[in-house]
Amino acid sequence: MLLPEPRSLTSLAELYGARYRWMLLAVVGIGTVGGVLETSSFNVAIPSLGREFQLGQERAQWAMTAFMAAMCLAMLPVSWLLERIGFRRLFLLAVTTLGLASLVGFCSESFEVTVLARGLQGAAAGVLQPLGILVIVRLFPVAMQGRASGVLMLGLAATPAVAPAIGGVLVDALGWRAVFLLCMPFCAVALMLGIFLLPRPRKAKRHRFDGVGCALLCAGTLCLMSGIAGLGSGGGSFLVAAAELLVAALLVAGFVAHARRSESPIVSLELFSSRPFAMGSLVSFTYGFGLFGSTYLIPVFLQDALAYSAASAGSVLIPGGVALVLATPVAGRLSDSLPPRLVAMAGLLLLGGSFLVLAALGHQRGLLAFVAATVVGRIGLGLILPALNLASMRQLQAQQLAQASVVVSFLRQLGGVLGIAATAVFVAWRQQAQGHRPDGDVAAFAQGFLLLGAIVLASVVAAARMANGRD
């Protein structure tokens, strides 16, 4: 069967009218949700995977960290790839890669192959992440961007909340490998719709790729991740981790020096001259840290410390997912009528406060109060992201939007990577300090929630400084 000849953006807009922008957003959103689904659904599989391959938590979490690390690094060249091969080819390639990597993971028989498959999934998901934001800021008028962002973030933010529940059912029924298949229906639908609805690319720009800058940022990111993951080790391993963190700082400093001299750096430092964007980038990092750190910590806490099944642990996040589904479109509309930074600040306060409550409830085995706290936190998450995207990017020029969407998505996912790694290492350190006693394990997880709460609440100051001229 021959594939249809792709149409131009103008002809597709004439064919479908005003609804075409929503159709295009839906296609990109479906593909992106497939990638996000594989991010957090795997959390509940970590204990089972660790038991099968006889791994400790500090090694088993690399199945998550590899995904998140690859997602971060794959985002960096997206703005260049958009200019070089176009939106259509890039989207279809990423969705196809995500599906094939999922099949490899489902068939894996070793931890190394599992990590490789997770890395490929993460790379594809990383390419997909910035594309939805780009559709919104390029195709939707300013007065509709809040509502469109709310619709997009409804899927992106709700998925991490409900995916562990679905993954838990699959793990209990079919084993941890079945989690790899969750994204397959989304890949199939996005690929089919994308072939018909994505416009043909414009003439490619022969823009020189900033290989030096990309290498510096990739190496710095990997050293940062490895250094944080290694902080929980003692003796010489701790010294190696400290050295990696120092190298990461030097590499980032090297990138800054390079970007100041380069004509077309992979990340332009000029973006950060906009205070709303600079502060929004910081909040985006914190958002990822809190979201993925908690989505990792809650199911592992319930299974390892309180002995719940994978399905029961995942089900704790279902009510929060429902609350998030209801809150996100409301947040999008609020961001069209209120200063977006105020909406984001309210969300951060709810999210950070929920972590403090979870820390206080750590010793209680009853789920009702625990579920209520997660509901409050997920409402906070629903408020943050639509407002954050608008507050940080509205003052930027049109030619800056592609790179800005990549940077915001990159920092959000980098925060997620470090949130998972830092939370896992911190809890393991506290468990070791308390002799791995049952009550000590519970206390260690409670302290992990305190860490997340403190970091999220501290970012309220940055959110308050996202004011622009109209605020």
Image: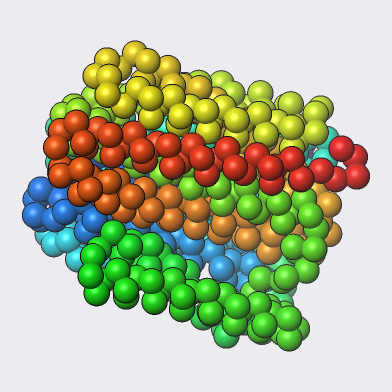
The image shows residue 386 at horizontal and vertical percentages of 66, 37
Instruction: Let me know if residue 203 appears in the view.
Output: yes
Up-down: is 294 above or below 330? Answer: below
Q: Nearer the viewer, residue 296 or 426?
A: 426
| Quadrant housing the C terminus | top right
The image shows residue 128 at horizontal and vertical percentages of 52, 55
| Quadrant housing the N terminus | bottom left
The image shows residue 419 at horizontal and vertical percentages of 43, 50
Q: Residue drawn at (38%, 19%), measured in percent from left and top?
A: 371
Q: Residue drawn at (74%, 32%), measured in percent from left and top?
A: 342
Up-down: is 116 above or below 18? Answer: below
Instruction: Let me know if residue 27 appears in the view.
Output: no
The image shows residue 450 at horizontal and vertical percentages of 42, 37
Up-down: is 305 above or below 316? Answer: below
Q: Residue drawn at (74%, 62%), measured in percent from left and top?
A: 272
Q: Residue drawn at (29%, 69%), measured in percent from left and top?
A: 238
Colour style of the rendered protein structure: rainbow
What residue occupies the far right of the structure in this picture? 469
Up-down: is 438 above or below 243? Answer: above
Q: How many marks?
A: 0
Q: Nearer the viewer, residue 301 or 434?
A: 434
Q: Is residue 196 left or right of residue 466?
A: left
Q: Nearer the viewer, residue 258 or 366?
A: 366
Q: Is residue 21 left or right of residue 395?
A: left
